[in-house]
Amino acid sequence: MAQFFKASRTNSAKNRILKNVQVEKLDHQGRGIAYFQNKPLFIDGGLSGESLDIQILESKKRYSKGFIKKINLASELRIEASCPHYNECGGCHLQHLNHEQQIKIKSAGLISLFKRFAKQAPLQLENPITGKAWAYRRTARLGLQFDKKLKLLKMGFRRALSNDLIEQKVCPVLIPELECLILPLKTLLNSLKSKMDLGHIELIYADQGVVVLLRHLKALPKRDLQLIEQFSECHKLNFFAQDSRHSVVCLSGNDQLSYQLTEWDCSLNFSPTDFLQVNSNVNQKMVAQALNWLALTKDDVVLDLFCGLGNFTLPIAKKVASVVGIEGIQKMVDRATENAAINNLHNATFYQADLSADDVDKQVWATQQFNKVLLDPARAGAFDCMKFITSLKPSHIVYVSCDPVTLARDSQLLLENGYKLDKLGLLDMFPQTRHMESMALFVR
């Protein structure tokens, strides 16, 4: 059979420069929206009413993406970014707007997404949960890359639209205890013999002080371990190392880490590799609002899905007859169980389960009767277990979301099964970025 060459279609619009593009509105992530070739053109950093020269970065069938080459006419809302790395770093997206405007954009975006995906428009959002606009992050992961030509180790966040690292010097969204370590840590790592074999580094703030977790691909030589210990003692650090087999060891400082939920007098132990909410202040307020919206009583039996370390579960346990926490990772289940014991909470039990599995309703814990449910899933949402949740017929469901699109999508099934969207509010967990967390209350 004869075969004929068929030329592939080229993305002729890519890299094209567009002059005097008019930004018409913003999307829920704060990106400017213009129109090119009869389809939306999303522009990072663009603001409504601005005239911009744009370079096309990506052109798809239904949309295009571009970035700003020149601002011809700036919005009156545009401000100077506070971070010197803003124009190159991929971490923050909204420093060209003040914090109040960021909240307005995200709030409008949340309402818009519910109109579009849940086919329901909340009449009014609850007051947003907010904290500090700067110096709020208690965790960060910095990339490490060895430059063979310069014989130097780069340390920083990734450059926007690239895998390359920026030359990080400051990061004003980090709490000061972490930010002040950026340059000293970079100097330390460049002094190590093993600097070519390092993966990344994580900074965490715990009750025990600053925690550093260094990912390394080969065993650290004795001299490097001595330098790390000296550095840790000088800066009063809890320094951990994780090898290629994911084994974590404490090289210096305290190997028992914890954080407090002060309002409920709860102490939660964690490992440097465990997930923590990055914004401690907003996390405390978020837990308080979730418990308030659940309207807990001493007779309630509550189900906490995607419970992690017990961030919501333990405070709930202080107010109800019993609570069951479900988590997909056994290590986290063990940690949550340990945390319940530490806090003398004997009415909180934890189970490991894949909440996307078809047989969730057949598992032992699922046969219990629950009258209230809280869920805090990852970005992918909880679509696979929404049918199970509705089958329980709880009076209250609080859904904490890190992606408003999946929250709005998952809400449809609740609305179709006799639930009403009673409250919806923004959680400002990540100021200066496009990331949006939210909380919804559904009642029967």
Image (cartoon, rainbow, N blue to C red):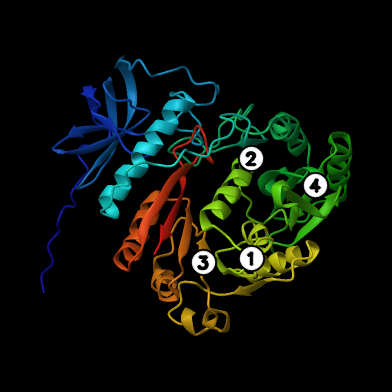
Residues at circles 1 and 3 in contact by the CB criterion of under 8 Å: no
Asked which secondary structure carries label 4, the reply is strand
Asked which secondary structure carries label 1, the reply is loop
Mark 3, residue position: 372
Task: Report whether residue 375 is seen.
Answer: yes
Answer with mark 3 or mark 2, whichever residue precedes in sequence.
2
- Mark 3 against mark 2, which lies toward the viewer? 3
Q: Residue at x 57, y 84 (%)?
A: 364
Q: Residue at x 38, y 28 (%)?
A: 45
Residues at circles 1 and 4 in contact by the CB criterion of under 8 Å: no
Mark 1, residue position: 298
Q: Which mark is residue 229?
A: none
Mark 2, residue position: 281
Give, as a three-letter code, the residue at label 1.
Lys
Of 272 and 365, which appears nearest the observer? Answer: 365
Q: Residue at x 32, y 16 (%)?
A: 74
For residue 148, side relative to residue 128 (left or right) = right
Mark 4, residue position: 239
Quadrant the C terminus occupies: bottom left
Give, as a three-letter code, the residue at label 3.
Lys
Asked which secondary structure carries label 3, the reply is strand
Residues at circles 3 and 4 in contact by the CB criterion of under 8 Å: no
Task: Work out how far the residue at label 1 is from the one at label 3, CA to CA, in angstroms.
Answer: 12 Å
- Mark 1 against mark 3, which lies toward the viewer? 1
Give, as a three-letter code, the residue at label 4.
Phe
Is the residue 144 above or below the residue 311 in the image?
above
Task: Work out how far the residue at label 1 is from the one at label 4, CA to CA, in angstroms.
Answer: 42 Å
